[in-house]
Image (cartoon, helix red, strand yellow):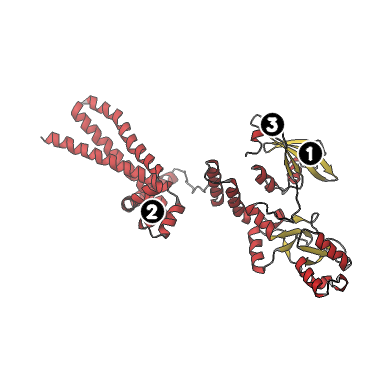
Amino acid sequence: MDTTQDLWLSAGIVAIALVLSAFFAGTETALTAASRARLAALEDAGDVRARLVNRILAARERFLGAMLLGRTLVMAGAAVFTTGVLATLFGKAGVLSALALLPVLVGLAEVVPRTLALAAPERAALLAARPALVATALLGPPALLAERAVREVLRRVGVRLAEAPSALTPREEIRDQMALLQREGGVAKAERDMLGGLLDLTELTVSEVMVHRTKMRAIDADLAPEAIVREVLASPYTRLPLWRGSPENIVGVLHAKDLLRALDAVGGDPGQLTIEAIALESWFVPDTTSLRDQLKAFLTRKTHFALVVDEYGEVMGLVTLEDILEEIVGDISDEHDVAVQGVRPQGDGSVTVDGAVPIRDLNRAMDWSLPDGEATTVAGLVIHEARAIPDAGQAFHFHGFRFLVLRKSRNRITALRLVRLGESGQPAAPGRQAGA
């Protein structure tokens, strides 16, 4: 009778151990796989269980240590009592049976709950919130003490466990998550690009998005008022820098609306206008200003236009609010914009690109990932990689592409042909040219 009771007691302990093992495995998987953003939203909505989960995850190391210690204890108990039960029933053959049966039982107790938890991690985390809090409170301190003891032993034998920094920054994690969601069809490419542009505002400077001074449309302040009015009306822009003596000497910014109001005030006679009196004061910003700071400055000053200068005070170009917004939402065109054909896909899968096309614009248009850390334009990238100014007809292979210089004007590369290369180093099939 006593033997029968002992067998049932041992079998009951094994069953409880397997249930606890399943609890520890499933809870660990659920809480680590659950979306922190979703849990935060649930907590803000008043969900008490979500608040408990967030409280547990705030002490992540203690929670994981408690789950590990709990699983270790119950698995050891399951092994001991399972072996005892089978040995009592079948003798030495029972011990061998235990060796074969234990991995199956433990595997089921680990795999099944983890699979169920991964299917609905937030729901599983909420269900396990209160038991997990109790388990962490009971097992967390012993787990931390055990870890410290292990670290001390390793330190004494000369092994130091440094805190491993995260391999990815929060921005990189968000970017990678968006790329994954796009590949799975949950997010459109345009949405991924918008979020990526928003994340890049702190990393990009105005010098990377500005209109270079060689492309600036400016007006000589010494021209006759009639000529200035004609130039303003012929321009697709509403704000035009005024220069005197040399294009780098900016003396003001002429706004088309201010000019039209002043022209109306003198009865439409341009000869009566004093152009510099109408012009706005120039606003100069350093070329190292981040786009986030410049966006804040635009909003604070309630203006959309600034001139960019280098460390010597020389004008490098201009930047507008639209330039910054285009880094987030993509190209913004209206009926007065000048069409710029900078990227022209060809039928053979290659892409003809103007040298002045920004790398970021090309990446967005073709869904490529050419690096833009060392150069802003495609021509600048080729010069940086070649360590020289190549001649027309020269070709280079880097970053998984073949760059062929088509045209060159003095020291400027004006046109290139890009071909994406496959893994073998040969041109990829035309259908793959647009994919990253």
Q: Nearer the viewer, residue 136 or 177?
A: 177
The structure residue drawn at horizontal position 24% and vertical position 32%, both measured from the top left corner, is: 83
Q: Is residue 73 visible?
A: no
Residue denoted by label 3? 427
The structure residue drawn at horizontal position 67% and vertical position 64%, both measured from the top left corner, is: 298
**With respect to residue 303, does 185 lie above or below?**
above
Residue denoted by label 2? 53
First reached walking from the N terminus: tag 2 or tag 3: 2
First reached walking from the N terminus: tag 1 or tag 3: 1
Q: Which residue is farthest left? A: 1
Q: Nearer the viewer, residue 101 or 427?
A: 427
Q: Is residue 64 left or right of residue 192?
A: left
Residue denoted by label 1? 405
Pointer 2 local density, CA inside 10 Å: few below 14, some 14–19, many at least 20:
many
**With respect to residue 279, does 66 lie above or below?**
above
Q: Which residue is farthest front? A: 267
In which quadrant of the rendered view does residue 312 lie? bottom right
